[in-house]
Amino acid sequence: MADPPNMEFTAEALNKLKTYAAHLPYSIEPNSDMQNLLDFYLTRITQCIEAKDYDPDLLKYPIPKPKRIALAKVYFDLCVTPGMPLHVVNTCLDTLNFLLRSKKKISVDDLSQTANQMSQLAELTRRFFHPACADEMVDTILPGFNGLDLNSVLSTQYYLNTFLPLSHPTWLPMLMRIWSPVNSYMFDERHFALLAQLAEIHLDPAISDPRRIDEIPDDARLDENGLPEDGPRLRWSTGDAQNPSSSVRVDVNPQQKMRRQSLGINGIGGLGLANGTHELPGKSQFSKPWTGIFKDIGIFTQEEWDLIMCKCLASMEIPLADAGSFMTGPVVDEQASFEFSRLPKSHWRIYSLAKLIVYSMAPDGKQLPHSGTATPFEIPVVTGGGYFNIPLPKREKSYLAGCKALDSLAKLIVSLESFFHPSNGSYTTDLSAFLKYIVFEFSKRWHHETLPDCKVPMNRRLTSEIRRELVRCLRTPCFLAMFSSDSDTVSNIQSALKSMTIMEADLIVPPILERAIPSLEALVETQRTLAVIKALGAVALGIVSRDVYYGGAKHLVQVLELLLPGIDAVSQHIKFSDLTEVELAAVSSDTKDASWSPVVTKADLIPTVRFDILPSPSEETDSRLSNEEEDRLLRDSTAGFANWVTGFIRRVIVLLENLPDETAPGSSNGGGTENTVVSAAMEACSQICSHLSEPLFDLVLDLVWNFATTTVRANAVRAVHQLVECVARANSAKTLKRFLPYAIQNIRSELDHGASSVRTTTYSHIEPSDATLHWNIAILRGSLYHGGRAVGLGLSLSVRE
C-alpha cells in the first residue's frame, strides 16, 4: 500500500488502516488512490461552497494534517457565517467535531483562532484560541457586566467561562473576586466546573509555560508575510519566569488599567502580561526552568481556597436550624430568564467539587504525626527575666498526611458526618455521591501518575500516606450511609466502598466483616441484613482476591455459609441479594477445598486498576498476620467447602421446584420477581461451576444429573435448561457424555409414543402430556449450548449407541 508523496501520516493511522484491511474478506483501494479521491472531494466541497450548495461529506480514510487544518478552518467559517441554515450549521458542527476531537492529530500549535466568533463553537474550538486572546476577551465581555442584574451576571460568566483560554489563567483572580459575592447555584455550578478543569490540566507545568505564548503560531493575527497586522499582542513576560517582579503590564487605556487592578487581572502567581514583540525568546532569557503556577493549595491561594470550601459547604444543601440559610441559591435562580435553561449544561456541581479537591491534593505541608506517636516535650532553659518571660516557640501548622486539600476535606467530612446517618433526608444522596466521586477521581489520578508518560512533577504526586488517610477519612460516613433505605445512596456507597477496597483493603474489609457477620447470624432486621449483604458485594474483591487483601480469603467460606439460609422460596429480596453476593464472590475466586492440596493458590484478579498496598506506621498494620499464618487459616476454613457447594446446589434445585406453574390456565412465564431471582441463581451457579476443581465439579454434576433425570416439572422447563447450561459451560465434554445420550433416547421414546401430536393454535398453553418431551428438549439444548468441538464427539457416540 504505497503512500503518495509529500503526505504527512502518523504511523498509528497507517498501522490501523493496514490492520483493518488485513481483516476484511475483500481487497480495498490503496491509500494513494483514496488520497487522490480525497483531493477530489475537497475540490467538490470548495466548489459547493462557492456555489452556495452546502452538502458536506463524511470522510473515513486518514487525512493528512495540512488538509485537516484547512478543512477545520473552512467548516469553522461556515458555522459562524450569518444567515446559515440551522441544519447546515449542525452538519458542519458534526464534521468539525470529527476533525478536531483528537488531540494527537491536531493541536493549538497547528491551528489557532481569535475569539470574535459565535459562542456555540467556543467549547469545541476553545483549546485552539491563542492564549494572548484572553486580554481582548476580557475587554470585550467584561464591560457588559451589571452586578445588580442576575441575567447580566450569568451571561457574563457564561461568556467568560466559555471563551477564556485555560492554558494561562491570568484572569482567575478576577473570576474569583466576581464569584465571592454572588449567591446563585447556576453561577456556582459553572464556576466549579471551570475550576475543576483548571486544577486538572495544570498538574502539568508545561501547560502554563510563558514560552508557549511565543511558540504557538498566531495565524489569525499575521498577514501573508508573517508580520502582525494590528501591532503586537500583549503576551507573557520574557524575563525571569520565576521572578514576579519582572512581570509587568503596560495598558494604554487608564480606565482599563484601573478596572484590571481593582479586579486583580494583573497576574497569578507572579505571572503577568507585558508588551513585547513576536520574536521567540532566547534560551538565555529564562534563568530557571518553569515549575508551573502552583500556589498555597494547588493553583489557588489560601484565601481563594477558603472561599471554595465555603461555597462547597453551601452547595451541599444541608438544612440548618435557621430555616435553610444555605438554600437561598435556588430561590435566587428562579429570577433568571428562561433563556439560560437553553444553554448547554455544565457538569454536576457535586462531581466538579470532588474533582477540584482531588486534583488540588499534593504533599504541600507539614505532616501531622500518626496516631499513637508521643507528643514531643522540651524543657526550655530559663535565663534572666524569669520563667514567664520565655517566648513561646512558633509552631508550624501541620496537615493531615502533609496535604492541605486533604486536611480541608477531612474537616468538611467531620462537620457533615452526622448528616450521613440513614435517618436523614434526601440530601444524603448528594453527600454519598460526593464520596463516590472523590474516590473515583482519586483512583483515576493515582493510576495516571503510575504511567511512565505522566507529566506531573514528582513533588506534586499523590503519596501512599495521602491515599491511606483519605480512606480513613471517608470510611466512617460510608459505614453510616450504607444502611440507608434510599437506593441511590446505597449505590453510591457501594461504588465508593469498591474503590476504597482496592486502595486500602485492610481498612475496609475487616470493619465490614465486623458488621456483616453478626447481622447475618442474627437475621433480626431485614433492612440491616440487606444492607450488609450489599456491602459484602461491594468489598467482595478484597475477600476473594489475595492480591488485593491477603487476609480476606479466610473469611470467604464463613460468609458464604451465612448467606446460604437466605436462598429459599419465600424471602425474595434477601434471596436475590444473597445470590448476587454469591455471584460476585465466585467471579474472582478459585473455589476449591484448599485442605485437599498442600499448596494454597492465589485467586485470579479480574481486569481492573490495581494498586500495591504500601503499609504506613499505623494501628491497622500492627495486627497483621504473616503469610504463612494466613495460609494455614485459609486451609482450615475451606475444609467444609464441599458441604457448602452441595447445600447451595440443593437450595437452587428447591427454588426451581417451587416456581409458578407455566401450564396453568391464564398464567404466563411467572412473575417478574421470579424471573429475576432465577436469572441471579443461574448466574451464580455458572460462576461457581466455572471455578470449581475437578472433584467438586464431579460432585455438582452428579447433583444436577440426579435432578434432571429423576424429575419432570412443567414449571421448571426453562430453568432446567439454564441449570444444565451452567455445568456445560464449565466442562462441556463431561456434560455431553452424561446428558446427550439420555436426552436423545428419551426424546425419541416420547415422539414414538405420540408426544406433541395434538394440534393447537396457541403457544402459551402447554399440554401436560408433553411435559416430559419439553423437559428432555431443554436438557438437550442446555448440554449443547456451549459444546464446541465436544458436540461432534458426543453426537458420534450417540449414533454408535
Image: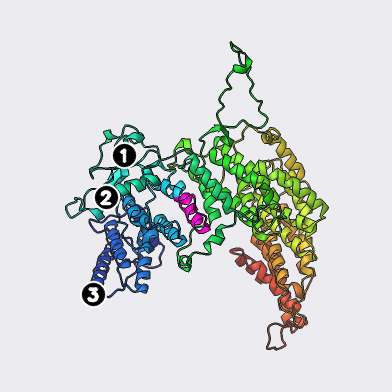
Residue at image position (39%, 45%) is 262
Q: Which quadrant of the figure has residue 713?
A: bottom right
Q: Identify the image quadrant of the N terminus.
A: bottom left
Vertical arrangement, residue 424 with respect to residue 622, above or below:
below
Q: Nearer the viewer, mark 2 or mark 1?
A: 1
Q: CA distance from mark 3 to mark 1?
A: 51 Å
| Residue reaching furthest to the top | 384
Q: Secondary structure at mark 2?
A: loop
Residue where numbered disc 2 is placed? 217
- Residue corresponding to mark 3: 51
N-terminal of the pair, mark 3 or mark 1, is 3
The local crowd at label 1, few if under 14, some if 14 to 19, many if 20 or more residues have their Cα within 10 Å, is some
Closest to the observer, 701 or 386? 386
Write the start and end of the magenta stretch as one range.
178-197
CB atoms of marks 3 and 1 within 8 Å: no
**Residue at 69% across, 35% down:** 624
